[in-house]
Image (spheres, grey):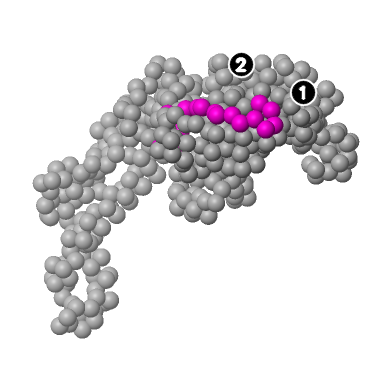
Amino acid sequence: MQVKETQNQGLKRGYEFTLPAADLAAQVDAKLKEAQPEVEMKGFRKGKVPMALLKKQFGQRVLGDAMQEAIDKAMRDHLEKTGDRPALQPQIEMVNGETWKEGDDVVVTVAYEALPAIPAADLSGVELERLVVEASDEQVNEALENLAKNAQSFEDRKKGTKSKAGDQVVIDFKGMVDGEAFEGGSAEDYPLVLGSGSFIPGFEDQLTGAKAGDEVKVEVKFPEDYGHPALAGKDAIFETTVKAVKAPKAAELDDELAKKFGAESLDALKTQIRGRLEAEYKGAARQVLKRALLDKLDALVKFDLPESLVEAEANQIAHQLWHEEHPEEHGHNHGEIEPTDEHKSLAERRVRLGLLLAEIGQKAEITVSDQEMTQAVLQQARQYPGQERAFFEFIQKNPQAQQQLRAPIFEDKVVDHIVEGAKVSDKSISKDDLEKAIEALDQV
């Protein structure tokens, strides 16, 4: 295989590989000769089929295999010799592929962008501030009261009392569209909490102020994007009978409430709540710490970036943000989305930091264990109840999906590695200040 360099500019590389026809023919003959002892063909004993007949019968297929193997080997040998690491899959094209015929040399062009050499980053001077928030008794009690509210019961109000927001009304109802009852539009003894938003807009409002025994004709319109197409945008009338009006009663803050949530006592439940709150604060504080670290790393070293990686990342950012702004669009039939300069700037930062963290992690011999991957797969699978097995099989068969799960785990481990060696000082702040710091992350 002959290799000629055609481009070497910045990170862009171009080569022309030439496989002489004689070498290719020799590979085909070697492959056929190797297979000959096992070949059976009508009119010949096993292993006695003439080479000329083998070449006529199988030559073209073997030729294609030999050609692909030769190109793949040449590519591996080239990368091993140069030490290049392509940023993306190299583009390989056969010269005169449409006019090539057996007996001609095989000439292919190879083009790729090489990953840059990452300069060593001096991490010894990295200084970071870690925010620390302790859960106050007031915050613990507030969380406890919310639990009690979720565990609330309802008691009948005095006869003749009008219902109000937060009350539970027990109703019978029958819904009709165009004078006809529709499937799923009726129920008896249905407990509805007013203000919960459980029914379509306007339904609960028209029952506010009703008393037990009242019959209310609720007139509403189904939303245009209602899940049932036959009802979407349609006017409806619900003939409703209010059978009871009940007032909410929060659960008592006692040991019995604690047991409902798996704790032995009220004090034990408070301890659990405090631990959960402080774990949430710690997780939020880590986001702030990580952003501060990435900002420092971004300014620490500079190097050329592969344009192909930056372009791909900018397109992904633009596509993701477009869908966030148009949540009603779930498909990809929206035409081309042109990345802005802001998208490209963010893409450059992400690519630079990704390459730098990968380099630091590799030098530190940081890896993602099978156990960590399994845990990540299990966590993702919970988002697909009833389809967990299909999700597992998808991950097993999809290396790209595996990489998408592995990448954030690896990145977090590298961040932890850097933080361990950095000068970190703790700063105690309030919950409100922590929330402001988190909000500031979204504004950058």
Does residue 123 appear left or right of residue 201 in this picture?
right
Q: Nearer the viewer, residue 384 or 289?
A: 384
Q: What numbered label is drawn on residue 259?
A: none
User: Which comes before the other along the chain, label 1 or label 2?
Assistant: 1
Q: Nearer the viewer, residue 285 or 256?
A: 256
Question: Disc 2 on helix, strand or loop?
Answer: helix
Name the residue beneath numbered marker 2: 440
**Image coordinates for residue 97, horizontal then vertical, percent:** 16, 45
Name the residue beneath numbered marker 1: 133
Q: Dot 1 surroundings within 10 Å: few (below 14), some, or many (20 or more)?
A: many
Q: Nearer the viewer, residue 161 or 336?
A: 161
Task: Report if residue 214 lies within the magenta region.
Answer: yes
Q: CA distance from mark 1 to mark 2?
A: 17 Å
**Image coordinates for residue 419, horizontal then vertical, percent:** 68, 29
**Image coordinates for residue 30, horizontal then vertical, percent:** 24, 65
**Image coordinates for residue 240, horizontal then vertical, percent:** 58, 34
Residue at x-position 40% and y-position 16%: 341
Q: Are marks 1 and 2 in contact (CB under 8 Å)?
A: no
Question: Disc 1 on helix, strand or loop?
Answer: loop
Residue 78 lies in what quarter of the image?
A: top left
* Amino acid identity at mark 2: Ala
Q: Is residue 210 above or below residue 382?
A: above
The quadrant of the rendering that contains the C terminus is top right
Magenta segment boundaries in residue numbering: 210-229
Does residue 158 appear left or right of residue 410 in this picture?
right
Magenta span main SS: loop
Residue at x-position 10% and y-position 46%: 99
* Amino acid identity at mark 1: Val
Q: Nearer the viewer, residue 396 or 364?
A: 396
